[in-house]
Amino acid sequence: MTYLLDELEDKGVLDKTLIAISADHYPYGLSNQEISELMGHPVEENF
């Protein structure tokens, strides 16, 4: 991230840039029941 921000700033476009970061991981290895317990509500099978 530091490199990206530095490069954007060096090119003069940092103040015109929006960076969105999102997690893309899933709790593999847990059953739907365990995931539902962690979420606090039932989850769908096709989550």
Image (tube, helix red, strand yellow):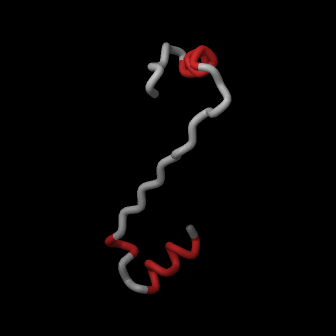
Camera-side residue of 35 and 29: 29
Q: Which residue is found at the position 44% from the left and 78% from the top?
A: 8
Give the position of the N terminus as an image quadrant: bottom right
Q: Quadrant of residue 35?
A: top right
Q: How many marks?
A: 0
Q: Which residue is found at the position 45% from the left and 80% from the top?
A: 9
Residue positioned most to the front: 46
Q: Which residue is found at the position 48% from the left and 49% from the top?
A: 22
Direction from residue 24 to residue 19 in the image, left or right? left
Residue 45 vertical position relative to residue 20 in the rendered view, above or below = above
Residue positioned most to the right: 29
Q: Quadrant of residue 33?
A: top right
Camera-side residue of 46 and 42: 46
Camera-side residue of 22 and 12: 22
x and y percentages locating residue 11 in the rendered image: 41, 85
Direction from residue 14 to residue 26 in the image, left or right? right
Residue 1 vertical position relative to residue 13 in the rendered view, above or below = above
x and y percentages locating residue 6 in the rendered image: 52, 78
x and y percentages locating residue 41 in the rendered image: 50, 14
Residue 19 vertical position relative to residue 41 in the rendered view, above or below = below
Q: Which residue is found at the position 47% from the left and 54% from the top?
A: 21
